[in-house]
Image: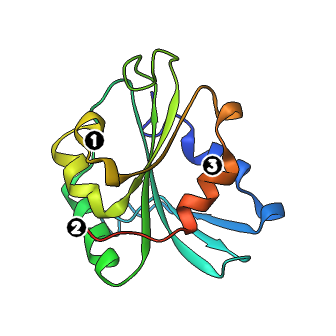
Amino acid sequence: MSADDGLRAIVHSRLGKAKGWHWTPIETGSTTAGVPDSHWAHEPTQLSGWVEHKATKGWAVTVRPHQVSWMLLHLRCGVHCTIMVRAKGKASSKGIGDSLWAIDGNYVKILAEHSLAELPEEALLGRWYGSPDMWNWYAVGAVLTGPRLRP
């Protein structure tokens, strides 16, 4: 399984230009550590932000220390940051075998130190079960552009 199990490509295609989304995939591993793998701009809301795409076959999600530091710094500056996790473990997807978790970036440190199962309820912006065709893409877009709470 790749680091995101194809999640970035799925999100970019489902929330595409026809719906006012503009995505920039980011690959900075050799130049700047910790930068999320996608930047988005949403014309209808005039907002922009960052998404880190991840995948897991269970509850544990690998988040590196540089990713935590980068995200927390930018969140303090008012930048929208979200972690999206494609979970294929039976427990984390209600036995269905696939699910999408949208997590408020303010909880990146908790996710890095614990697991999906141990996230506080307010960390979860949304969760959708089944294949990507079953995920509520309108709701996914709404959580990316929606307000965030400070932990």
Q: Secondary structure at mark 3?
A: helix
Q: Secondary structure at mark 1?
A: loop
Classify residue 141 by image quadrant.
Answer: bottom right
Q: Nearer the viewer, residue 65 or 138?
A: 138
Q: CA distance from mark 3 to mark 1?
A: 20 Å
Q: Mark number for residue 11?
A: 3
Q: Nearer the viewer, residue 130 or 26?
A: 130
In-image side of 43 versus 2 (left or right): right
Please report contact status of discs 3 and 2: CB closer than 8 Å, yes or no. Answer: no
Q: Amino acid at mark 1?
A: Thr
In-image side of 103 versus 112 (left or right): right
Task: Provide residue 97's location: percent of width, then percent of height.
Answer: 50, 18
Q: Which residue is mark 2?
A: 69
Q: Mark number for residue 62?
A: 1
Q: Secondary structure at mark 2?
A: helix
Q: CA distance from mark 3 to mark 2?
A: 24 Å
Classify residue 151 by image quadrant.
Answer: bottom left
Classify residue 135 by image quadrant.
Answer: top right
Q: Which color mode does the image show?
A: rainbow
Task: Provide residue 121's location: percent of width, then percent of height.
Answer: 32, 47
Q: Amino acid at mark 2?
A: Ser
Residue 147 versus residue 4 in the image, above or below: below
